[in-house]
Image (cartoon, rainbow, N blue to C red):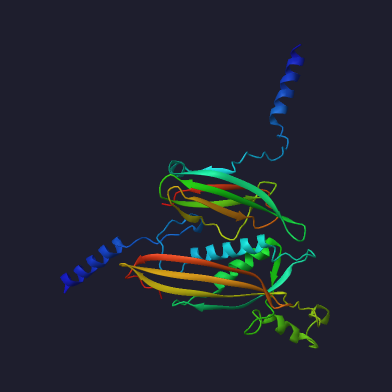
Amino acid sequence: MKSLFLASLLVLGLVGCASQPETNTTMIDRQELRVDPEVVYAADVTELFKSRLTLPDGSSLLQVQFAVEARSDTELAWKVTWFDDLGRVVKGVGESYRQATLLTGQPRYFKATAPHSRATSFQLHLREPK
Amino acid sequence: MLIRALAISVGIAVLAGCAAPTRYIDPAADDGPVAMTMDYRDFEKAATDAVEDMLSSGAVNNPDGSRYIMVVSRITNDTMQRIDTDQLTKKIRVSLLRSGKVVTTTAVGLNGAEDEMNMKARELRDSEEFDQSAVQRKGTLQAPDLSLSGKILQRNHKVGKEQQVEYYIQLSLTELASGLAIWEGETPIIKRGSDKSVTW
């Protein structure tokens, strides 16, 4: 009985020391649209479309279009970050935010095209420039 | 004499203390003041607009699936500033290369090859000092399919007590086989600020 208990303890100890099995990289759910509270206060994102644009060579590019309508005159900064199917960032031309001025009640439409056909998902971030 | 030297030292120390500290600026998060002259943000905006439009228009998409070869032609600087237009064209070249659609040749240019080593390396032909199997053979350089040209314009206006400076970045992509501009774009960059600002 005592030897059985010792054997069990030994097995448990060994299991505890064993290296953890490799797991696949967990994909964190990434929001496609992130709007900072200051922007939510001043404007609404009324539309957000995504589609793949087919090119003459058969490849395709992810395109995003969104519309914003302001409740009061405000400044907006926006940026789209592109990701491949493994969730890695696909580098675009620049890294900076694009700025826009919104006038009260004026709907504005903005479009962005992925820099490579490898891009399969995106994140659109809207913030107020300081 | 000693008092004068002390006063100068104290003055310098005070001025140094008031100076803004030198710091790095992250281009991805730069909300800093805007200059009336063209800065890196303007070139980035123009390059982003141009590349996104070129890619989505299909102009740089070779139907046979291979990459187009582009040469950078003249980008005229018609502003009051000394601008190195490579600041604009380099961003476009890098992005088009990354897109997998276009590669730029450095063997051809309006003022000779951008990289003179293309021809220098070929001068090694028939030299007994070099292993000829590694020397570039005749007829290996690739001729361009597309040419990128353009102009940067500046217009100054007085608006009330302020000054308005308009920059227009105009670009054309010409298909060299036909001489037709298969893509054209213009990015206006308008700035309004103090009339005392200097834009050259």
Residue most extreme to the right: B133
Placement of A85 over or under B131, stated as above or below: above
- The image shows residue A2 at horizontal and vertical percentages of 74, 13
Question: In the figure, is residue A78 to the left or right of B121?
Answer: left
Quarter residue B106 falls in: bottom right
Question: Where does the image place residue B75, in percent across and percent down from the top left?
Answer: 57, 77
| Residue lying furthest top | A1
Compared with residue B35, is residue B114 higher up or lower down, i.e. above or below? below
The residue positioned 38% from the left and 65% from the top of the image is B192
Task: Locate residue B200, reporting x and y percent.
Answer: 41, 76
| B59 horizontally vs A95: left or right | right
Residue at the spot 27% in from the left edge and 65% down from the top edge: B15
Quarter assignment of residue B118 = bottom right
Give the percent coordinates (x, y) of residue A39. Answer: 46, 45
Kindly tell me whether residue B37 is visible in this rendering.
no
Instruction: Choose between B47 and A5: the one closer to the eye.
Output: B47
The quadrant holding residue B1 is: bottom left
Residue with the most extreme front position: A105
How many badges with numbers are in the image?
A: 0
B97 to the left or right of B137: left
Any part of residue B33 in sight = yes
Asked if residue B89 lies left or right of residue A53, the reply is left
Residue shown at the point (50%, 59%) measured from the top left: B27
